[in-house]
Image: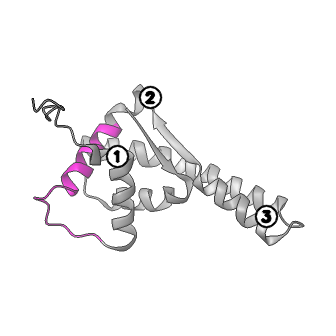
Amino acid sequence: MKIKIRNIDLEKVIIFLENENFKGLKSVNRSKLTNYLSEQLETVVAGERTIREDGKDKPKQWLEQELKAYFDETVTVEGSNMLKPLNVVKAKIKELTSEECEQEFSGDDAYALSVLYDAFNLDEGEDVNESDNNGN
């Protein structure tokens, strides 16, 4: 399993996950994921600083274009050491987006939830019993 999160969305996703209620081992796994994302965010911030320094003597449009392209790049979370943390967070996102969930989200939390929902491809559904073109 792997997920991709755009550089521009990292901070919102980290804050959202850290504010969600995970208990026991699930909390440990959530922290493993948020710690990894935080390390990636530090790299993104350093990259932004470099782009801004390189763009000091260039037109404003160049800087805006470079930053936009950089922020649209993604961080990939994958590998066997991240399988359990990803599964724990995926289950939580499924729970939070289910029709039974009465918790409401707005602002950055709603945005971060949407980013994670898309990253885990939860909109594709998991019903393998859908009918084929022959009505089966």
Q: Is residue 119 magenta?
A: no
Q: Quadrant of residue 98?
A: bottom left
- Judged from the image, the secondary structure of the residue bearing numbered disc 3 is helix
Q: Nearer the viewer, mark 2 or mark 1?
A: 2
Between the C-alphas of marks 3 and 2, the distance is 36 Å
Q: Nearer the viewer, residue 56 or 99?
A: 99
Between the C-alphas of marks 2 and 1, the distance is 15 Å
Which residue is identified by label 3? 62
Residue 18 visible somewhere in the drawing: no
Which residue is identified by label 1? 30
Q: Amino acid at mark 2?
A: Gly
Q: Quadrant of residue 108?
A: bottom left
Label 2 crowd (10 A; few <14 / some 14-19 / many >=20): few
Q: Nearer the viewer, mark 3 or mark 2?
A: 3
Q: Nearer the viewer, residue 84 or 130?
A: 130
Residue 46 visible somewhere in the drawing: yes
**Image quadrant for the N terminus?**
top left
Q: Is residue 95 magenta?
A: yes
Of pointers 2 and 1, the one earlier in the residue sequence: 1
Which residue is identified by label 2? 79
Q: Are marks 3 and 2 in contact (CB under 8 Å)?
A: no
Residue name at image x 29 percent, y 59 percent: 20
**Image quadrant for the C terminus?**
top left
Estimate the x, y position of residue 106 in percent, counting from the top left: 31, 73
Q: Amino acid at mark 1?
A: Arg
Residue name at image x 72 percent, y 66 percent: 64
Report the span colored magenta: 85-105
Q: Residue furthest top?
A: 80
Of pointers 3 and 2, the one earlier in the residue sequence: 3
Q: Nearer the viewer, mark 1 or mark 3?
A: 3
Estimate the x, y position of residue 76 in percent, counting from the top left: 50, 40
